[in-house]
């Protein structure tokens, strides 16, 4: 019996052998991937940032998942044609839309090593180094934000999940019970990112009262109205509990008046959450620090390393000023985790104690490796550069006839529109953005502000420099003139 069993096991072992490529096979695979990566990076400055090639993506399912493998060259060809080519390239210097993404080379290497070693980064006792790496990075972020030693946080998959953790921490800090939710009040603005309303929904707070505080002429929360609204709600016996401020809105890059909002939160005993998913990392540089006073005063903060620290997508962070509040929201024990008490000092929090996740990607490595290999100074310089590039664009565009500029940029997003000599401005700007996108050398996006179709230029790519902004100005001028001449 056992001989039959053993025979079968050996046979299965042979069949599963391709899961363990030998050294020569690994060398061939790595060589192919590395040469693909090399040519991708060499070409990213020249290839169009946008390719309308949705048809190509449909060819991917034409090569279905099956019992028969394909070679690495064929796999890379499929990947290139069906995945990389169609759509936008967020790592391209000309990507100036939405919030640009990054993709630092050293981060890719960090991801590679994270996958190869596959350390279990969620629990301190099985991977003390990996857990400590995450904690050390969060401390570093807390440091440049100006958060105290009591702060704790979590490196998440992105800003939306980080936001959810913060909202849950606020809910638990107030020990809001289901019956109290209809009396609770949350303050935000029309410019608050929709990940906030989504988090409110997921956190079971949908029945809270939401007050959308009006905006000033720079799209920032009006604090006078915030205060009046809280007072009124209190008078009516409601329970104001949470303010969601934004340090750099997605639409316009506006920074809410954080010191005044923090004063109000303090005076009335509300939790202040600040969404710095886009803007928070600017606190690393001088210009950014000036634009973000009072950032350290919030109770919780979201910051997205896959935006402002140029990482590939899949890295957000939440920080809570009083770290015990985060633990209170997420700590739970499991009987099968009992060995930890013998293996390591139990006073260390595990990432899993501060997060809804247990098993997780070993994300810290994609942040740690670039910071160690590059040092902080080039990050600081790049962030300053992005702010100055936005200011440069603003100054230059101000003197281009026909263009109307929005407020002077707080950070690195500029909003503007073209006012045509005749006809409807909204229609004109819609045509203009389409012409720019079809051209493909740069990629901008638009938004609607007070009913006005508005164009926006967001500078955050680490590959975006002065030449690209010059090109953007040239293209905008040319396309606007062309459209003006055809109507
Ligand atoms: C991008 C963004 C988010 C959401 O972050 P994800 O990482 O995309 O989930 C939240 N708030 C602001 C201001 C953002 O710019």
Image: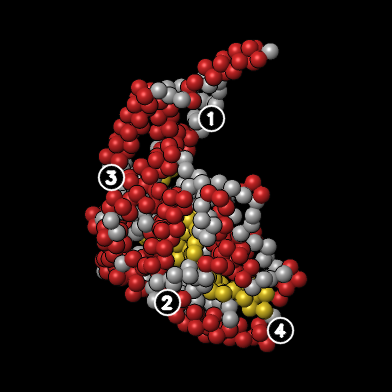
Could you tell me how far apart the alpha carbons at marks 1 and 4 are, in whole angstroms? 57 Å
Residue 301 image offset from top left, x and y in percent: 48, 67
Task: Point out the tag, 1 or 2, that comes first from the N-terminus.
Answer: 1
Residue matched to label 2? 294
Task: Point out the tag, 2 or 3, that comes first from the N-terminus.
Answer: 3
| Other residues around mark 2 within 10 Å, as few (<14) / some (14–19) / many (≥20) | some
Residue at 67% in and 66% down: 205
Between tags 2 and 3, which lies in front? 2
Query: Mark 1 and 3 residues: CB-CB less than 8 Å, in contact?
Result: no
Residue matched to label 4? 237
Could you tell me how far apart the alpha carbons at marks 2 and 3 are, in whole angstroms? 38 Å
Could you tell me how far apart the alpha carbons at marks 1 and 3 are, in whole angstroms? 30 Å
Question: Can residue 113 be seen by looking at this rendering?
Answer: yes
Task: Point out the tag, 4 or 3, that comes first from the N-terminus.
Answer: 3
Residue 359 image offset from top left, x and y in percent: 55, 46
Secondary structure at numbered mark 1: loop
Residue at 52% in and 63% down: 193
């Amino acid at each position: 019996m056992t001989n039959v069993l053993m025979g079968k096991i050996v046979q299965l072992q042979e069949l599963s052998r391709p899961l363990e490529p030998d050294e020569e096979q690994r060398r061939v695979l790595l060589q192919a991937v590395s040469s693909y990566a090399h040519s991708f990076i060499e070409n990213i400055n020249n290839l169009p940032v946008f390719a309308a090639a949705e048809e190509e993506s449909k060819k991917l399912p034409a090569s279905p998942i099956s019992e028969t493998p394909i070679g690495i060259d064929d796999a890379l060809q499929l990947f290139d044609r069906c995945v990389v080519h169609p759509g936008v390239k967020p790592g391209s210097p000309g990507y100036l839309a939405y919030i640009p993404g990054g993709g630092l080379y050293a981060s890719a290497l960090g991801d590679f090593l994270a996958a190869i070693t596959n350390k279990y980064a969620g629990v301190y006792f099985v991977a003390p180094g990996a857990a400590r790496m995450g904690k050390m990075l969060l401390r570093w972020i807390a440091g440049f934000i100006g958060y105290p030693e009591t702060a704790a946080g979590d490196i998440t998959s992105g800003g939306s999940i980080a936001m959810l953790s913060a909202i849950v921490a606020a809910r638990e800090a107030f020990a809001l019970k289901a019956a109290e939710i209809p009396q609770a009040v949350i303050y935000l603005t029309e410019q608050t990112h929709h990940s906030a309303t989504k988090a409110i929904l997921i956190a079971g707070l949908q029945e809270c009262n939401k007050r959308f505080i009006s905006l000033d002429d720079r799209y920032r929360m009006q604090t006078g109205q915030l205060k009046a609204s809280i007072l009124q709600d209190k008078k009516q016996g409601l329970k104001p509990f949470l303010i969601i401020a934004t340090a750099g809105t997605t639409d316009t890059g506006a920074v809410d008046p954080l010191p005044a909002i923090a004063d109000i939160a303090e005076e009335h005993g509300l939790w202040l959450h600040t969404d710095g998913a886009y803007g928070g990392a600017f606190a690393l540089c001088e210009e950014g620090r000036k634009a973000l006073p009072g950032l350290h005063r919030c109770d919780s903060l979201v910051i997205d390393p896959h935006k402002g620290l140029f990482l590939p997508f899949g890295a957000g962070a939440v920080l809570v000023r009083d770290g015990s509040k985060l633990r209170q929201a997420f700590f739970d024990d499991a009987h099968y985790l009992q060995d930890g008490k013998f293996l390591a000092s139990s006073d260390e929090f595990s990432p899993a104690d501060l997060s809804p996740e247990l098993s997780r990607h070993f994300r810290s490595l994609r942040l740690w490796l670039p910071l160690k290999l590059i040092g902080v100074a080039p990050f600081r310089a790049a962030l300053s550069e992005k702010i100055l590039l936005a200011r440069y664009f603003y100054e230059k565009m101000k003197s281009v006839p026909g263009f109307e500029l929005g407020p002077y940029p707080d950070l690195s997003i500029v909003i503007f529109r073209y006012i045509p000599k005749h006809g409807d401005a909204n229609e004109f700007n819609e045509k203009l953005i389409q012409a720019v996108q079809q051209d493909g050398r740069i990629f901008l996006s638009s938004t609607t502000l007070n009913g006005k179709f508005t164009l926006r230029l967001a500078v955050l790519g680490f590959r975006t420099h002065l030449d690209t902004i010059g090109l953007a100005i040239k293209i905008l001028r040319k396309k606007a003139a062309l459209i003006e001449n055809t109507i």
